């Protein structure tokens, strides 16, 4: 049976009365049998610990291996999915480019047709203008634009101008004009202006439907070719406001 000792008087070892829990415990003495049994337990514990460590390392290695395999598998799937999506996107782009190319070709063909038709129409209009000029005795028939001023007259045009006392009132009462007038913020001033009315004759035969020549007359001839400018007209209302007098801030009244 193991015995427990502590230092006594004069440094001699004496048996510890408190056993293994004695505060002065300095030495433990065992029999050979006890020592052998204890050593056997230690070795067994060491072997168990080594086995547990070995198994743990194996498990960790196996877990790492499986994790790498899983990651590699996911990476492979992700790359395959990415390649598939990229290829799908490329197919969409290729189809879009092909469609765009087809549309571009169709647009070029349409523009060529329009260009040819416009050229033919220009020639037709030119011939028509020259014939009209010849029939009316206008010279030179090839250079003259074919427009004649048949008559002009001047009259007084009445129109109204709304005048606000301040810009702040105009902003605040722009949707309530009645209240603005009652409060004296807005007043109407009656004015008159000298307005000219001219009647022009075009070089186009009256048998031609108006919709076929209206754009040419209003946009191409009167404005782009400057025919209206030649007779002193600096502006023109849209058709819905035809006959309505207006004021242009830059050029004055027209």
Image (cartoon, rainbow, N blue to C red):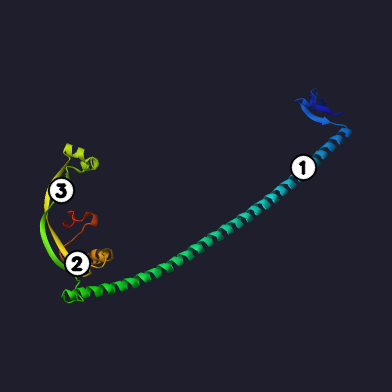
Query: Left or right: where does residue 215 sit relative to residue 81?
Result: left
Residue denoted by label 3: 160
Distance in Å between CA atoms under marks 2 and 3: 30 Å
Q: Residue at x 17, y 65 (%)?
A: 200
Instruction: State the image coordinates of residue 33 (x, y, percent, origin top left).
Output: 89, 34
Tell me if I can see residue 12 in this picture.
no
Number of numbered discs: 3
Q: Residue at x 16, y 66 (%)?
A: 230
List the single residue furthest toward the top: 17
Residue denoted by label 1: 52
Label 3–label 1 contact, CB within 8 A:
no
Where is 24 relative to 96, above or below? above
Q: Quadrant of the N terminus?
A: top right
Mark 2 falls on what kind of element? helix
Mark 3 falls on what kind of element? strand
Residue denoted by label 2: 227
Mark 1 falls on what kind of element? helix
Residue in the foreground of this view, choosing between 79 and 66: 79
First in sequence: mark 3 vs mark 1: 1
Distance in Å between CA atoms under marks 2 and 1: 106 Å
């Amino acid at each position: 049976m193991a015995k427990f000792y502590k230092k006594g008087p004069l440094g001699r070892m004496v048996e510890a009365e408190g056993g293994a829990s004695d505060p002065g415990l300095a030495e433990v003495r065992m029999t050979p049998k006890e020592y052998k049994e204890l050593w056997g337990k230690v070795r067994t514990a060491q072997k168990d610990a080594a086995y547990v460590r070995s198994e743990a390392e194996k498990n960790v290695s196996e877990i790492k291996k499986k994790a790498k395999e899983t990651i590699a598998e996911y990476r492979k799937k992700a790359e395959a999915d990415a390649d598939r999506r990229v290829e799908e996107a490329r197919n969409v782009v290729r189809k879009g480019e092909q469609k765009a190319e087809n549309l571009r070709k169709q647009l070029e063909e349409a523009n060529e047709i329009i260009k040819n038709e416009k050229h033919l129409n220009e020639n037709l209009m030119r011939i028509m203008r020259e014939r009209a000029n010849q029939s009316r005795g206008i010279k030179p028939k090839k250079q003259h634009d074919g427009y004649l001023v048949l008559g002009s007259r001047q009259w007084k045009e009445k129109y109204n101008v709304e005048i606000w006392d301040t810009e702040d009132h105009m902003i605040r009462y722009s949707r309530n004009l009645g209240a603005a007038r009652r409060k004296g913020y807005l007043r109407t001033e009656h004015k008159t202006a000298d307005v000219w009315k001219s009647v022009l004759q075009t070089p186009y035969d009256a048998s031609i439907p108006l919709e076929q020549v209206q754009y040419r007359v209003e946009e191409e001839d009167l404005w782009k070719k400057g025919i209206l400018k030649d007779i002193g007209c600096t502006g023109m209302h849209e058709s819905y406001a035809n006959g309505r007098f207006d004021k242009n801030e830059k050029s004055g009244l027209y």
